[in-house]
Amino acid sequence: YKLWLQYNYIEDSDIRDNYLSHLNSVQYFGDSETINVIKEEISLAMKSLFGNDYLKNINKNGLIIGATSNLNTKILKKLKNEISNIQKDGFVIKQVKIGGIKQIVITAKTDIGVLYGTFNFLKRLQTHQSIDKINVIDFPKVDIRMLNHWDNLDRTVERGYSGFSIWDWHRLPNYIDTRYKDYARANASIGINGTALTNVNSNALILTPHYIEKVKAIADVFRPYGIKVYLTARFSAPIEIGNLETADPLDENVAKWWKDKTAEIYKEIPDFGGFLVKANSEGQPGPQNYGRNHIDGANMLADAVKPFNGIVMWRAFVYSEHDPDDRAKQAYSEFVPYDGQFRDNVLIQVKNGAIDFQPREPFHPMFGAMAKTNLMMEFQITQEYMGQGTHLVYQPKLYEEVLKADTYREGKGSFVAKVIDGSLHNKKITGIAGVANIGTDINWTGHHFLQANWYGFGRMAWNPYLKSSDIAEEWIKMTFTNEKAFVKPVKKMMVSSRETVVNYMTPYGLHHIMATGHHFGPGPWVDNLSRPEWNPVYYHKADENGVGFNRTNTGSNATAQYASAVKEIYNNIETTPEIYLLWFHHIPWDYKLKNGETLWNGLALKYQQGVNEVEEMKSTWNSLKKYIDPQRFKEISMMFDVQLNDAKWWRDSCLLYFQQFSKKPLPKGVEKSK
Ligand code: GCU
């Protein structure tokens, strides 16, 4: 339940004594709700890390915590250079000598920055890093770092696999579940500063006074932790709860209704963040219902929140059955022509890939393609297409792959991360969102290891250039133990787990072959759905001649949506990285892969490799029993049984299905379940 804020007692007396020699006391400067929560956190952490050894002697080396505006000039003088380098909610942690005493100062321009610095410092203690002569300066590279909850008002969670929604609407606003505070602590500890509480397939009722009061209660808990609340805005709300006859964004009454509604929300929640909108996608209402477009819709809402410094996050996840040639092209075709026409407080929220949170997709061609529009990333933390709440898949590895991808929009080195932190096109507001995997389960995320995906998302939102393997290491140490014999194998297992899921589900660029509807197990065979693009055969196009989706210039030409350097790579089968082969090409079964195998054999061997790797993860885990408490050990061990079973299920069914087209035997080494 405590996530990565376990603050395990430091058993090693050398480390403990060294820390304690620096931590005889702590002095706080400033007076705010945020400073109060810092005091609480420090006291909780210190007691837990050091037991009763934590002394209070202000005449010896200690901690000084407070924003620069509250520190005395003596301290400020010592930190002059560092302070001038603090950006946004960044912080400095530095040891200085004052009056012969060594003080570790944690400071920032804002109290929230001080809170981030405090959590950073506590992380160092949790992960047993040296604090001798500590000198750290850090700041968030992305402005809006938020979670998107796909939580419904009846507490079910769309694509949620960890129980029900943690928002207890029935008991709010009077009953404040302690989980809200723990949620805020966990998020603040990784720098998350926003949360959209409700599903993108939204319910207009959330905008009624009855619910606004409840949202306010949550916002009040989150405020000291620097977390703003956002809501999803159902485009047809003016009709559903406002008694208007239309939701046409160009209708004056509609625009006025949204202005008034926004003012009503800000009256209760002065730091309300703004709206997240899914419009004209998968049957949701939107401006196109009235012959208007995304610009009309987004700008109308942007004007309503503008006086309060609010923002609108308008999602680019759109596709329709009326344009069935290639769903992967639709978001780009619909949005890119609008570049430069959205208000400056609109961010277009784009999923990492052009289809839908697959185990592997090439980066979305919209990244880098809208130089005059704020564009934010949407990752999925919940694992809709990756084994849901039961498979260990360390997703920061996927995030890293996408963020490192080169869009070539401004020449070589135009990484997706530069689009997201705004540096590629000099953006004023930047953002990144993750669809939460959080629910009422005692461990929050169903599978203990999936806490790492929440943690890792937050860390990469703060700094999209971090290495996912470094993040895994700190998470393991904070969550379980610093024991090397545990950290090393577990880290290895986490870091490789993403490739493993690709291997047993969708190797070589296969995608969207999950069972229709729930998207859990394999289902490449379904072929009787009303919409072609909901049908897995649409994506793999297997037949006797081969398999894969030709998206090159001889096919759907989706490759033309990339910068020319990228387009050329993907148009040519020789230069297309094999991980994307069947994403971009339809290939004969006997095509020779780089390793000399035929495509059919290679595919079969990848599925087998996926199974083997899960077996390895399972045995690694079983060898680590002595390092971890019996409950977590057992729960995780049971999850590995599920994952192994499912991996075999994927291998068996996909190979059996594709074999009817390839008409070839399974190569040596590929097993089949009885
Ligand atoms: C996927 C998912 C839906 C979700 C949608 C979205 O299609 O299956 O449940 O609503 O993405 O992101 O809007």
Image (cartoon, rainbow, N blue to C red):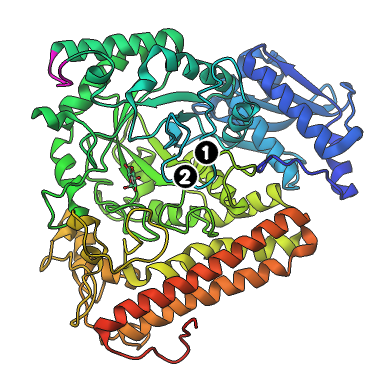
Residue contact at pointers 2 and 1, CB within 8 angstroms: yes
- Residue 287, quarter of the rendered image: top left
Name the amino acid, label 2. Gly
Percent position (x, y) of residue 191?
Answer: 54, 34
Percent position (x, y) of residue 127?
Answer: 72, 47
Q: Is residue 387 left or right of residue 328?
A: right
Q: Which residue is mark 2?
A: 160
Q: Which residue is mark 1?
A: 164
Q: Residue at x 13, y 62 (%)?
A: 556
Q: Is mark 1 within 8 Å of ligand 1?
A: no
Give the extent of the magenta segment. Answer: 245-251
Q: Residue at x 18, y 54 (%)?
A: 530
Give SS at disc 1.
loop
Q: Residues within 10 Å of mark 1 (few under 14, many from 20)?
A: some
Q: Residues within 10 Å of mark 2 (few under 14, many from 20)?
A: many
Percent position (x, y) of residue 470?
Answer: 59, 54
Q: Quadrant of ligand 1?
A: top left
Give SS at disc 2.
loop
Above or below, comparing residue 566 to residue 645 in the picture: above
